[in-house]
């Protein structure tokens, strides 16, 4: 089993910054993708940023230039530095780790952390 523990959410004013962290533990396959997704009220969950084991990153267009994802493979951790936050960034942010190409069932989620950006 795999567990993901997120931290770092909170309330911030527009233009401010937050840093989210996620630690994965358990039976983790080394070749994996870790990342962040978010879900705002009444909307579908969407990709924010992902980081593959080989170093490839992918960002949603809405966060490019403002958010930076990083990961520590040795510690199975992923971080999301969020700068210049906007009210539309308000959502529950979920950490994800997956290696579905190897095992279709290998797709794990954290419990979510609330990010609220006030105008």
Image (cartoon, helix red, strand yellow):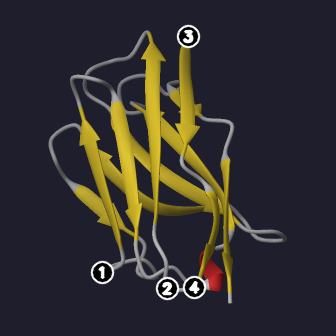
The tag on residue 65 is: 1
Left or right for 71, reference 5: left
Quadrant assignment, res 115 = bottom right
The tag on residue 1 is: 3
Tell me which label, 4 or 1, sits earlier in the chain. Answer: 4
Q: Nearer the viewer, mark 4 or mark 1?
A: 4
Mark 4: which secondary structure?
loop
Q: Residue at x 60, y 35 (%)?
A: 109
Q: Residue at x 42, y 48 (%)?
A: 35
Q: CA distance from mark 2 to mark 3?
A: 38 Å
Q: Nearest the camera: 104 or 64?
A: 64
Q: Quadrant of the C terminus?
A: bottom right
Q: CA distance from mark 1 to mark 2?
A: 13 Å
Q: Nearer the viewer, mark 3 or mark 4?
A: 4
Dot 1 crowding, Cα within 10 Å, few <14, some 14–19, many 20+: few
Pointer 2 residue: 15
Tell me which label, 2 or 3, sits earlier in the chain. Answer: 3
Q: Is residue 69 above or below residue 106?
A: below
Q: Which residue is at the far bottom? A: 119
Q: Quadrant of the N terminus?
A: top right
Pointer 4 residue: 14
Assess whether mark 4 and mark 2 are in contact (beta carbons under 8 angstroms): yes
Q: Residue at x 39, y 30 (%)?
A: 99
Q: Which percent across, then down, holds residue 88?
A: 64, 82
Mark 1: which secondary structure?
loop
């Amino acid at each position: 089993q795999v567990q993901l523990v997120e931290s770092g959410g909170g309330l911030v004013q527009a233009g401010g910054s937050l840093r989210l962290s996620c630690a994965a533990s358990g039976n983790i396959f080394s070749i994996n993708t870790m990342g962040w997704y978010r879900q705002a009220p009444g909307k579908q969950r969407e990709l924010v940023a992902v980081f593959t084991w080989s170093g490839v990153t992918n960002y949603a267009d809405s966060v490019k230039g403002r958010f930076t994802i990083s990961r520590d493979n040795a510690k199975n951790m992923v971080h999301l530095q969020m700068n210049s936050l906007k009210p539309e960034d308000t959502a529950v942010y979920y950490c994800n780790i997956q290696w579905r190409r190897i095992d279709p069932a290998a797709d794990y989620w954290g419990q979510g952390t609330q990010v609220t950006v006030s105008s």
